[in-house]
Image: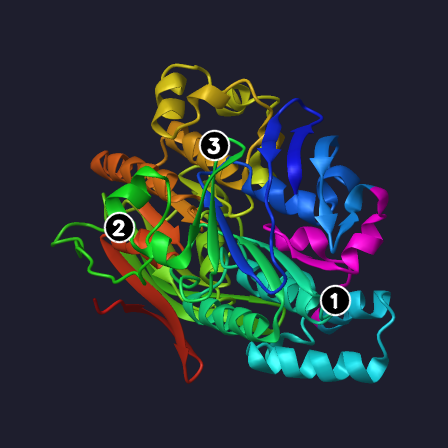
Amino acid sequence: MENVSFTYEQGQTALKNITLDVKKGEFLVVGGKSGCGKTTLGRVINGLAFGFYRGKLGGKVLVDGEDTAGMALWEIGERVASVFQDPSSQFFAHRVRDEIAFAAENYGLEKEIILERLDRITAELGMADLLDKDMFSLSSGEQQKVAIVSALIIDLPIFVLDEPSANLDAEGTEALGRMLSLFKRQGKTVIIVEHRLYYLTGLMDRFVYMNQGRIQTVYNREELLSISQETLTAMGLRTLQTPMLSLNSRGCKGGQPSLDVKELTFGYSKKAVFSGINFEACKGEIIALLGRNGIGKTTFCKILAGLLKEKHGSITLNGKTPGWKQRQRKTFFVMQEAELQLFGESVSEELALGFRTNEGDESILESLGLADLKELHPATLSGGQKQRLIQAVSKKSDRDILIFDEPTSGLDGENMLKTKVFFEKLSAEGKTILVVTHDLEFVATCCHRAVVLKIKENEWFFDEWDS
């Protein structure tokens, strides 16, 4: 990359005078605060910045010595495999097996080669049981795995991955780390944009730290590991160490639960998603809901919020048992796909939609680091900024029970801590907060209690995390 700049059509300059050489076989990690330009850097390398997202590119991007400005997107795609931050945006087929095979078929690989790679890679990642499932019945973490395998099967020399671990459970993240380690041994060039760093410290050759659209510093692995946690936090970076959980369990201490779930059962047609779940939470609790990808955590929360109707069982809120539609007015559910809940023409308008007053909006935006973005269109925000905007709307809703699905998946270290402070303020106000997450660093930092959704002998249950 030679003196590269990029400005989106809306006027947002994401990259400023970037010069960077990446050697063949190098493992490069790109990090920095949300909105610093990391994702756009990846889009410039794989050609999407100027081939799909509208904007103006300055400078040169050379792949294997060839200027990508003169190449069609499919030509860049023959050299660079990409995994997007939002995996569903790159899907074409309805069945997992067909989706994984599609890219390889598109580039003319022989059927025998496709089948061999498909079986080998899905076995290595523990995904064989997903192959015949409908793509859109998968959890977000399972979709992320499919996107990764769809890129792997083409076996290209360069890989650009944008936050590939964001939706993965602990087991999936470990499997991803093993696959990336294999790439390194095979001499692939890997450029990975990521907030979670702990699973990459043994793999990275260099770490590129970006700030406000520029490359501020480039560290080798030893230099990065020598930085104190205090300095990393000030830089907006997350921990380099595997998170260890030590939770402050609260419980109801003899009081009435604000949320009490008894024998909850749900399924589609004759297929059970889960059955017989019992769960309770109390005012002021911040509870992490853990469990492997696809076990039913998000579905459980959608039922609590009245977005889906239970088959059997009861849900009691503050001593009353409202119907599923009434629960929609008593809870607030923040989806993982933040853009699905954004409707305004600006950040400030988004916060005003559906409410009678704008009182307190400025302080809410300020608390989540969004005050300087209030005139921007929500679509121009980074993934982490969109998540924080929906969190701001949840605060203004003033509901007693707030449910967040992967609220930190796109957040840097600084904004993860802002979310922690935000949740703690809601807790102090007596709100009950449920957090569906795979982000153990956030759980260790913020949550009072963690429960794991499990299944054993066809019985579903929440097991308390043994800290």
User: Picture quarter containing residue 191?
Assistant: bottom right
Q: Is residue 56 left or right of residue 371?
A: right
Tell me: residue 55, above or below residue 304.
above
Disc 2 target residue: 445
The crowd level at tag 2 (other Cα within 10 Å; few <14, some 14-19, many 20+) is: some
* Disc nearer the start of the sequence (3/2): 3
Q: Are marks 1 and 3 in contact (CB under 8 Å)?
A: no
Give yes or no for contact between labels 3 and 2 (Cβ–Cβ under 8 Å): no
Look at mark 3 in the image and give the residue it sits on: 389
Task: Identify the amino acid type marked 2.
Answer: Thr
Local secondary structure at mark 3: helix
Q: Earlier in the sequence, mark 1 or mark 3?
A: 1
Q: Which residues are magenta?
A: 70-96
Identify which residue is drawn at 23% across, 38% down: 430
Residue nearer the viewer, 243 or 38: 38
Q: Could you tell me which secondary element the residue under label 2 belongs to? A: helix
Label 1: few (<14), some or many (≥20) within 10 Å? many
Question: What type is the residue that disc 3 sits on?
Answer: Leu
